[in-house]
Amino acid sequence: MVPRIVTKTLVALLAVALSATAFGEGQTDSATEAPETVLNLVSHGQERGLTGWARGGNFGMAVTNSLEESLPFDTLLLFDPTYSELRPHIAERWEASDDNLEYTFHLRQDVFFHDGEQMHADDLVTSVHLGLGTGKAAGRTVAQLAKLEGAVDYREGAADSITGIEIVDDFTVRFTLTEPSYTFLTAIAAQPIMPEHLLSEDLRDNRTLIFQSEYWQHPIATGPFKFSRSVPGDFAELVAYDDYFLGRPQIDKVIIWERDPIIAAEDGKLDFMWGRDPAQIDQLLQTPGMSGYPLENGAYKRELWSNMEDGTMGDLRLRQAIAYAINRAEIAAQFFNGYANVWHTVVPPTFWSNRDLPQVPYDPDRSRQLLSDAGWDPDTELTLIYYYTDPQTSDFMALIQSYLAEVGIRVSPRLVERDVGTVLHDKTMSWQLAYGARNSIDTGVLHQYATGAGNSPTDYSNPTIDRMLAEMEASLDTAERKRLADEIQAIIMDDMPTIPLYATKEYILHSERLKMPVKWLNRYSHPFDLRFHEWTIEP
């Protein structure tokens, strides 16, 4: 490893010298100085993002999945706006071996951290170790990164490093997997690049306490905006990074407020947000100076899960009867006032959804016939568990209860407020149906239908699905992956372990002063190519 080089400081000093020569020492060209431009955001969540960092909040160490995190933290690759293809970013190119067990990434050589240190291969290696070793990464991300050779031993503390990561040279890193995995590529693509020179000591000494590092008081990264200051409970401030490798951002400053979006908009302190709360969207669209549009796709869908371990739900005719008994069109149009779409597959509305599947109509007569064919006992009561505590969900459970009662199915809704994961996945209490949500911008949601999947509330098993999932995971060809994803969805909907209900409509809301070069198609779940440095806003 050659010594790190710092050249940006010298460039800055030269620029100051030239400025003094042109205008005279102590003078400024005030006549041409443009007014400062400021982008106002509201925090993604009080324990996430920049405002949460200063008090030890839960920053997504292994994935950059909110807008405010992606302004200072840049990633290895970017998705295209449809989330169907990956594009070069900090990695200028990459290649896979013929067996898809090795990925080699070639890093740009013009990327510098906000403190002037040049980014090298060891920064990427440190970042992956942070993602796997801190205990903060999301379960799905851990599962994807854990396919690296030696990752499990490192995660469990049996090894000090991951053997499947090799630094080829200062700007090349090779990853070796235990099995072919496209989802590993999507996980590593969203990996925020962290500074080895500031975090390696903390990582070595006690990686599980990395969030207590002083680094988080003033994080340094490589993104288009750099951290300036933070007042916990109030705001965080970012400023444009002059030496960003794609060019200095057009916007001078970003302020991320911890406040209600409605109040922020009324105070002129909201220029951009993503939202899916109908009342909030309506009010913001009526606020002077605010505009917005619905996303073509959405990451969230709500559905009913059948407990396939329970003998009652093992009959396909019962599951079909429940599906036919529910009036999805009425739910979308009336219960959610048009802020939901009827949905008929297990993948949320994205590029990867099979939108050609036949819709399940509202047909209570057919539901009753299926129940009769199944010999259904109307005195049988099904337990329907749910875990959302808001009043709207309680009302929605009552609506589902009434739909099913109409065809002769008794349902008892039950709120689960604690240990939701164990109740859903480990079946620590008896239930037949569960109401919940799944969000995904790619094919990851399909893996919960693999036999023995740890995140599956249904405990569904189908050898054909298992084989096709393995084929999809091993393929790097988008068209082939899409074909397999469509076929898998068709089989799942025939078996119906899950009954999709609706997908929430999601909106981009922004001030009329803000101009963005790329139209949003999906909400920001993983980094996609939005060209932040080209955003502009009127003073």
Image (tube, rainbow, N blue to C red):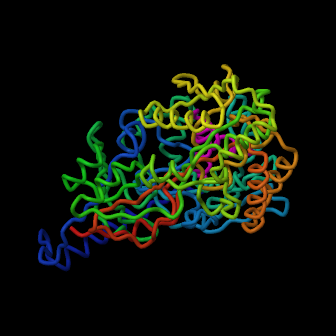
Task: Kindly indicate the quadrant of the structure image that contains residue 52.
Answer: top left
Residue 471 on image: x %, y %: 83, 56
Could you tell me what secondary structure mostly forms the magenta stretch?
Answer: helix
Horizontal side, residue 481 vs residue 1: left or right: right
Horizontal side, residue 42 vs residue 36: left or right: right
Would residue 146 be seen by someone viewing this image from the given angle? no
- The correct choice, above or below, for 338 with respect to 157 in the image is below
The outermost residue toward the bottom is 22
Quadrant containing the C terminus in the rendered view: bottom left
Magenta stretch: residue 529 in it? no
- The correct choice, above or below, for 176 with respect to 497 in the image is below
Magenta stretch: residue 136 in it? yes
Residue 292 on image: x %, y %: 36, 63
- The correct choice, above or below, for 19 with respect to 527 in the image is below
Which of the pair 297/225 is nearer the observer?
297
Would residue 412 be seen by someone viewing this image from the given angle? yes
The outermost residue toward the top is 429
Task: Kindly indicate the quadrant of the structure image that contains residue 252.
Answer: bottom left
Q: Residue at x 36, y 37 (%)?
A: 54
Task: Kindly indicate the quadrant of the structure image that contains residue 403.
Answer: top right
Q: Residue at x 64, y 56 (%)?
A: 442
Residue 210 on image: x %, y %: 50, 33
Total marks in image: 0
Magenta residues, as a range? Answer: 122-148
Horizontal side, residue 5 vs residue 377: left or right: left
Residue 130 on image: x %, y %: 58, 41
Quadrant containing the N terminus in the rendered view: bottom right
Which of the pair 36/490 is nearer the observer?
490
